[in-house]
Amino acid sequence: MLTVPECENAKSRDAIYRLKDSPNLFLVIYPTGRKSWEYRYQDQGKSKALILGEYGSRSPAFGPRTAREKRDAIATDRNKGRDPVVGRKLEKERQNQELDAARSARAARQAEKARQRLEAERGAITVKSIAQAWLKEYRSHWSAGHAWQCEQSLQDHVFPHIGNKHPEKVEPAHIVDLIGGMLAEGKVETARRVRQRLDAVFEHGGLYYGFKSNPVALSKRELSKRFKVAQTANPEQHFPCVAKEEIPQLLRAMRSYVGSPVTRGLLWFVCATGCRTGEARFATWSEFDLERAEWKIPSARMKGRRPHTVYLAHSVVDLLGEIQQYSRGLPWVFPHPARNDKPISENALLYAISAIGFKDKHSGHGFRRMFSTLANESGLHRPDVIEAALAHKEQDNVRAAYNDAKYVEERRRLAQWYVDELALLEAGSKAKSAGVRTSLSGGG
């Protein structure tokens, strides 16, 4: 029989070899230096081997004595008709089954905790909280103006009615009443946008919170009927814009406006540049290079998701210089009068237009139509240059892919020509003018 020193001193060789300890028990030495105890026996004329475990003289000890005891126990089982190999497999299967059962139980406990947590969360969830989560998820993909419109429409038309309701407590009838009320007031376009946004909110709730029903989708058929009736009663109207012959009157009325300097500045800025009102409202001073007379609008704030440069006439640069004194050190060019975290309200321009007597006759977007009309009818500027100045997307996809022209110098001339033309129209004569009088010091 092997002694502990003999086991310890057994050196590895290039190939596996065995040292016999006692009947049917061997110490196997591997080329790597690893050692293990092996039980060898005959079963129905076939030689079989069973590894009893790794050799070790330290804790946990598995020296010669322990190996012999384990061999004797296996031999006793064999005498009782138990195959040790089969027994080893059965034991391993039992252990695997126990392990699988433990894993399943742990997974079930985790699932139950998650269910309980979700139930607790869902109990505190409201339509408003889901809507806010939806806004947060998609805000980075929208322009600042679109994000503001989405949030404002929900605050104005949804939250007062169903904002505090649990999403699963909202019935299709609630949606029909909400949207139907807006349609009854003739707010067809607003109702359409609110319905779209509510639909997206409930889809978000279904995706992330597991709500099974979308009441907006279920009310689709009934709302479609009501939309048809409302559209017939309130046909779609384009953004109003004064006729060309009324432009002088509009400009003189703008000159007489006595509202806040910031609102007056916004009114003239949108008029003189032909930009979108949202682009102007959210403009920051960091976007302007007044020395180069350029305004670079980032793609995130553009309708077409492409950066755009507006070239500024001399009088517009002067206008911006006057506006700066009213910025209160804020980043906004046109800051909100009472808050530091947001720009001037979307309605400020509409109120100003209404105050000068042009409600329902003209609009913020009407200034873009006015720019396009005057520039195109003049015959002095190429249509491509005018479209580029207005940041209109090329309709021909093939042409758009190859036409990346900026027309910089032509657009600079167009910008200066336009404010000069407005000045002439306001003055009511074709006398040479240096540009639009845009002083913020007062009207008259």
Image (tube, rainbow, N blue to C red):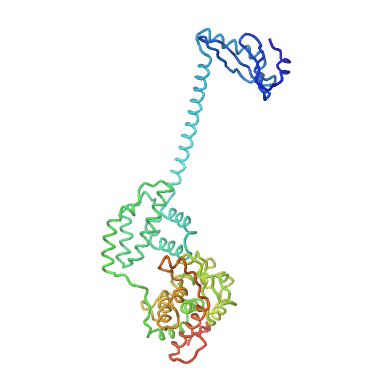
The answer to which quarter of the image holds residue 132 is bottom left
Asked which quadrant contains residue 15, the reply is top right
- Quadrant in the picture for the N terminus: top right
Q: Is residue 215 left or right of residue 332?
A: left
267 lies above or below 212: below
| Percent x, y of residue 11 | 71, 20
**Residue 136, image x and y in percent?**
48, 56
Q: Nearer the viewer, residue 11 or 177?
A: 11
How many labels were placed on the picture? 0
Please provide percent x and percent y for residue 403: 47, 69
Q: Camera-side residue: 165 or 191?
A: 191
Residue 91: percent from the left, percent from the top?
51, 20
Residue 125 versus residue 209: which sits nearer the camera?
209
Residue at left offset 29%, top offset 70%? 235
Looking at this rendering, what residue extends furthest in the top direction?
79
Residue 369 vs residue 49: left or right? left
Instruction: Residue lying at the far front in this picture: please name it.
Output: 14
Relative to 415, residue 308 above or below? above
Q: Is residue 121 above or below residue 141?
A: above
